[in-house]
Image (tube, rainbow, N blue to C red):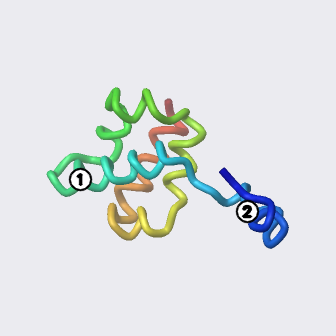
């Protein structure tokens, strides 16, 4: 929970916070990708589907640290699957 002093220091900080569900999914995506699975395949897992909306999943694909870990090609393929799906 935010306290008054933190709100006064940065009143728009809530706009940039990430949910713990997103962080857990990032950890899951990274682990599964290192095991050799494609990002497109991982995004169809029930674990991901039950925790994040499609919009949240798209937003994940814009995170620079995730792109670095997963690679440009896999992220581009996953973005394309959102467009086609």
Q: Residue at x 35, y 55 (%)?
A: 74
Between the C-alphas of marks 2 and 1, the distance is: 29 Å
As helix, strand or loop, the secondary structure at mark 2 comes to: helix
Q: Is residue 37 left or right of residue 81?
A: left
The answer to whether the residues at label 2 and label 1 have Cβ atoms under 8 Å apart is no
Q: Nearer the viewer, residue 7 or 53?
A: 7
The earlier-in-sequence mark between 2 and 1 is: 2
Asked where in the image residue 68 lies, by quadrant, the reply is bottom left
> Mark 2: few, some, or many residues within 10 Å (few <14, many ≥20)?
few
Q: Residue at x 41, y 62 (%)?
A: 66
How far from the left and from the top, in percent, is residue 30? 29, 55
Residue beneath disc 1 = 31
Q: Nearer the viewer, residue 41 or 83?
A: 41
Give the number of the mark in front: 2 or 1: 2
Q: Residue at x 79, y 67 (%)?
A: 5
Q: Is residue 59 left or right of residue 6?
A: left
Q: Nearer the viewer, residue 21 or 45?
A: 21
> Mark 1: few, some, or many residues within 10 Å (few <14, many ≥20)?
few
How far from the left and from the top, in percent, is residue 24? 39, 47
As helix, strand or loop, the secondary structure at mark 1 comes to: helix
Residue beneath disc 2 = 13
């Amino acid at each position: 929970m935010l306290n008054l002093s933190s709100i006064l220091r940065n009143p728009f900080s809530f706009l940039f916070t990430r949910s713990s569900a997103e962080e857990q999914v990032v950890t899951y995506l990274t682990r599964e990708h290192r095991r050799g699975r494609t990002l497109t395949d991982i995004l169809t897992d029930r674990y991901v589907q039950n925790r994040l909306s499609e919009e949240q999943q798209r937003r994940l694909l814009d995170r620079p640290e995730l792109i670095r870990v997963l690679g440009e090609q896999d992220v581009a393929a996953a973005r394309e699957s959102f467009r086609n799906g």
